[in-house]
Amino acid sequence: PVFAHRVIVNSRQTASTKRRTFEAEQILQEILQKTTVPI
C-alpha cells in the first residue's frame, strides 16, 4: 500500500529501463482509474 498523495516512478532513462518505466506508469494509471476515493 502507498500512504502518500503522490507516487513517482524513479528510474534512469536507458534503453533497458524505458520499457519497465512505461509498464510501471501504465500499472499506476490503471490503479488510479480503478480505485475509488471517498470524498
Image (cartoon, rainbow, N blue to C red):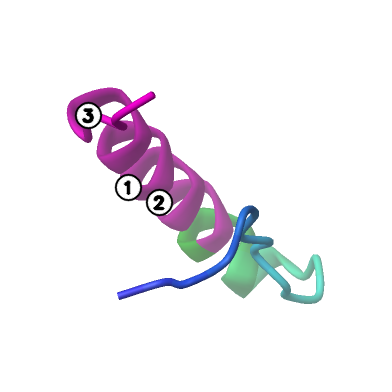
For disc 2, the marked residue is 23
For marks 3 and 2, give the CA distance.
22 Å
Q: Quadrant of the C terminus?
A: top left
All told, the count of numbered labels is 3
Residue pictured at 27% horizontal, 41% vertical: 31
Residue flagged by tag 1: what amino acid is it? Ile
State the mark number for residue 27.
Answer: 1
Instruction: Classify residue 26 by image quadrant.
Output: top left
Q: Nearer the viewer, mark 1 or mark 3?
A: 3
For marks 1 and 2, give the CA distance.
6 Å
Residue flagged by tag 2: what amino acid is it? Glu
Q: Quadrant of the N terminus?
A: bottom left
Mark positioned earlier in the residue sequence (1 or 3): 1
Along the line of sight, the residue nearer the viewer: 23 or 7:
7
Residue pictured at 32% horizontal, 47% vertical: 27
23 shown above or below 16: above
For marks 1 and 3, give the CA distance.
16 Å
At mark 3, the secondary structure is: loop
For disc 3, the marked residue is 36
Report the magenta stretch's main SS. helix
**Magenta residue check for 15:** no
At mark 2, the secondary structure is: helix
> Which residues make up the magenta segment?
21-39
Q: Position of residue 29 (x, y in %)?
A: 41, 34
State the mark number for residue 7.
Answer: none
Neighbourhood count class around disc 2 (C-alpha, 10 Å): few under 14, some 14–19, many 20 upward: few
Residue 17 as seen in the image, left or right of residue 33 = right
Residue 9 as seen in the image, left or right of residue 10 = left
Instruction: Classify residue 13 by image quadrant.
Output: bottom right
Residue flagged by tag 3: what amino acid is it? Thr
